[in-house]
Image (cartoon, helix red, strand yellow):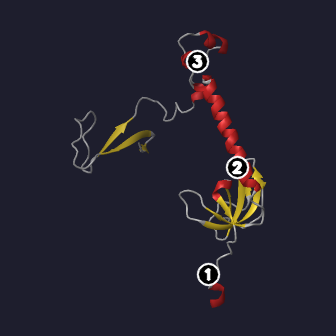
Amino acid sequence: LPYRTWGGERHIAVQGRPGVSPPPPVCPRPSSNGVSQVVDRSGARIGEYEDVSQVEKYEMAESDYEKRPESLRSFLRQRGWGRYDEEGTRRRTQEQQQRWEQEATLAAALPVGTRCQVRVPGQPCKLATIMYVGQTDFKPGYWVGVRYDEPLGKHDGSVGGRRYFECQPKYGAFVKPQSVTPGDFPEEDDGLEDEL
């Protein structure tokens, strides 16, 4: 709630809603504009509980928690859920490995310098030039760095302080290999240069 200070005291402004009757007053009646003023005389400071490092917490040793029969960890282990689902973990690891192998195969077929069409789900089709193909530091897997023909990108070829390729600001982007179709896609000439 917004508050105001008058003479060293804090006053919280509470705005009434149109068409709704206010509750019975526990403080002075609202003024004609529907604003009640509440004065905090408790001495409590606003925000005094925001720093949780000062709050005492109960801590238990890892070995003691492992021994407890009625813990969340014990519950998950008994049912084979979460990280205790060995078959599911193995299956997810295999699926991830297959996705990376598929990405590597697709990425190998995308030579740097080739014109391409980028089709990211939920976005319009964009024309670009492939500037980088490979793994990156910002996310796992294979990525394709592209330079768009128009300023539809997110950066200038560098992400997280590392430069992967050169381009103008807002012309660069990284997309997954499955979103890139290489081919003969010449840059579109909108004819504006001839008219000048």
User: What amino acid is at disc 2?
Assistant: Glu
> Label 3: how many residues lie within 10 Å, few (<14), some (14-19) or many (20+)?
some
Q: Residue at x 23, y 45 (%)?
A: 20
Residue wearing tag 1: 190
- The answer to whether one can see residue 159 in this image is no
Residue wearing tag 3: 77
Q: Where does residue 55 sit, x and y in percent of width and height?
A: 56, 24
Instruction: Give above or below for 101 relative to 181.
Output: above
Which quarter shows the N terminus? Answer: top left
Which quarter shows the C terminus? Answer: bottom right
Quote the CA–CA distance across marks 3 and 2. Answer: 34 Å
Q: Is residue 8 left or right of residue 56?
A: left
Q: Residue at x 25, y 50 (%)?
A: 18
Residue wearing tag 2: 103
> Label 1: how many residues lie within 10 Å, few (<14), some (14-19) or many (20+)?
few
Q: Is residue 183 left or right of residue 125?
A: right
> Which label sits on residue 43?
none
